[in-house]
Amino acid sequence: MKQPSGEKTSTESRRDPWQLPMTTAYGVLAILIRLIPFSLRPPNFAAHGALGLFGGAKTPLYFIIPVQWATLAVSDTILYYAYGWEPFNLAVYVGFTVYALLGRAFLRKRDSVMRITGVTWLGSLVFFLLTNFAAWIQLSPLGSGPVLYEASLAGLLHCYAQGFVFFLFTLAGDFGCTAMMFGVEAWLRAKNEQRQADAAATEVRV
């Protein structure tokens, strides 16, 4: 049967009322995790990648991207005043924005476990390649920082090799936080559907 023009699509109808506040709550969680000292948290273990994937899949881009950047800006500001960390790394902001775009492109209509796993891996990889490329530019004769790498392919590969352990921490944070975020949302959706089914069954019995 042809769908009436005024009826919502299946994707739109699946947007549950808690997805916007849930994404906002996950943004607060991402800030809190990023503020945990490295003595208790591995470097690069963060929830911002998972936040981007979840928000991109469940909310409009005009919502998740500002939320993503706001959580980074808030935590950057706190870390700057608390520890003197250099804030507002453009490569980091762009890298985490890519997660939102990937969530929108690949998980908006189909968020199966296999797809979430593959897109999470892809997001981690893109973030690693992008941020380490930016670090190589900054820390080679091409940039303005101290020279740690040659301005050559060998220097770039050396930079990636040096950052590989951080890639593993990024994977751990992305997979752990993504599983939690999508898992909680799936549980709430299942509970809501069960509640609606029980209500419908009660109406039929009455």
Image: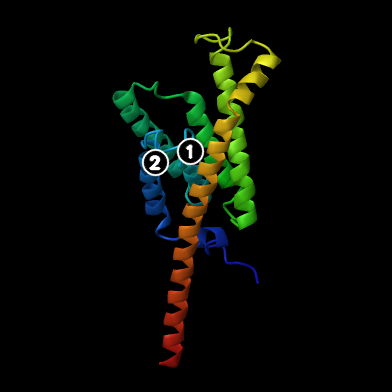
- In what quadrant of the picture does the N terminus appear? bottom right
Q: Residues within 10 Å of mark 1 (few under 14, many from 20)?
A: many
Relative placement, left or right, of 64 versus 165 is left
Query: Marks 1/2: CA distance?
Result: 8 Å
Residue designated by label 1: 45
Which residue type does callout 2 highlight? Ile
Q: Position of residue 36 (x, y in %)?
A: 37, 37
Q: Position of residue 69 (x, y in %)?
A: 42, 34
SS category of the residue bearing label 1? loop
Of 87 and 10, nearer the camera is: 87
> Which residue shows up at 46% across the image and 24% down it?
89
Is residue 11 depicted above or below 123 in this figure? below
Verify CB contact (< 8 Å) between mark 1 and mark 2. Answer: yes
Q: Position of residue 82 (x, y in %)?
A: 30, 26
Image quarter of residue 195: bottom left
SS category of the residue bearing label 2? helix
> Which residue shows up at 61% across the image and 46% down it?
119
Residue designated by label 2: 33
Relative placement, left or right, of 82 versus 59 is left
User: Does label 1 or label 2 sit earlier along the sequence?
Assistant: 2
Is residue 25 depicted above or below 132 in this figure? below
